[in-house]
Image (cartoon, grey):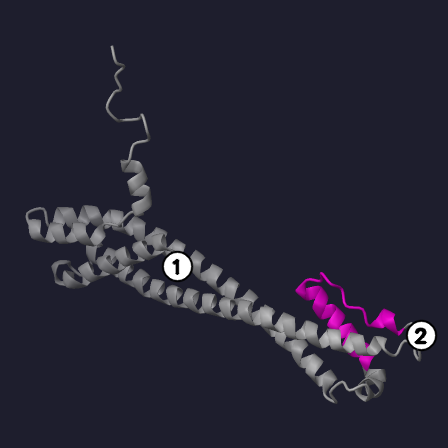
Amino acid sequence: MDDKQRRKLETVSRLDDFGQAHAADFAANSVGKQLFTEISNIATRLAGFASSQTTGRALALYGTSTRAAGREDLRVSLEAICRTARAQASEMPGIEDNFRLPSNANDQELLAVARSIAENAVPISAQLIALELPTTFLEDLNEDIEALEAAISAQTIGRGKSAAARAEINDALDSANIIRRKLDAVVKNKYANNPGVLAEWVSASHTVRDPRRRQSAETPAPGVGGPASTNPA
């Protein structure tokens, strides 16, 4: 959640608090009561969306970090297998073609190559183990493949979950803003003779603007809006 969303969400929370504090002032079937109920429901939904977005971002970050480590582990395993297999070229002509590791492969290409190498290594696993590859090298390779696949999946799912939550948050905030405008009229009419509650409403219903945007709007550009320059006589 960015700062702009967070400020708007805080406004919705304050609107809900105001409605709860003054619930007794509005009849059960009044427009004001209905609008504050809608605000309360939106506040609850927003809390859930915010939690979902946080979870999605955490999952995406986890996937990103484990993806880098998984890619490196897989490449190290593949390099050892390919190097060892190529050492058999004199006894197995053409074996190099089955054990080539591209230098600039992306993760999906690397996974495809890894699966192919794993399959090609099965018939000659005994010879490769005889050259001091670990006896579990095929199991280790498959684990590395699965680890990278899992990291990619976590990153993709996390990003999707975060993006979906962001869209839901924006939609809910748009709805809340429409209700806030209606409530502004209701509350100002309801408490026209109660300056204390009106001040409370103004404080609750405002949304703090981005300070950088406000500063840029208040600070005139050089030569614009400043005192007129004068030329010496």
Residue 74, numbered label: none
* Mark 2 and mark 1: Cα distance apart in space: 58 Å
213 or 71: nearer the eye?
71
Q: Which residues are magenta?
A: 95-121
Predominant SS of the magenta segment:
helix
Determine the image quadrant of residue 14.
bottom left
**Looking at the rendering, in which quadrant would you find the N terminus?**
bottom left
Q: Residue at x 85, y 86 (%)?
A: 127
185 horizontally vs 9: left or right: left
Residue 148 in view, yes or no: yes
Q: Residue at x 31, y 50 (%)?
A: 177
Determine the image quadrant of residue 7.
bottom left
Indicate which label's residue lies in the foreground, 2 or 1. Answer: 2
Count neighbours of disc 1 (C-alpha within 10 A) and say few if under 14, some if 14 to 19, many if 20 or more.
Answer: some
The residue beneath circle 2 is 93
**Looking at the rendering, in which quadrant would you find the C terminus?**
top left
**Residue type beneath disc 2:** Pro
Vertical relation: 215 (above or below) 156: above
Q: Check disc 1 and report its element: helix, strand or loop.
A: loop
**Residue 152: x and y, percent?**
60, 68
93 horizontally vs 8: left or right: right
Q: Check disc 2 and report its element: helix, strand or loop.
A: loop
The residue beneath circle 1 is 1
Q: Residue at x 47, y 62 (%)?
A: 162
Count neighbours of disc 2 (C-alpha within 10 A) and say few if under 14, some if 14 to 19, many if 20 or more.
Answer: few
Vertical relation: 94 (above or below) 202: below
**Residue 155: x and y, percent?**
55, 67
On whether residue 66 falls in the magenta region, the answer is no
**Residue 134: x and y, percent?**
73, 87
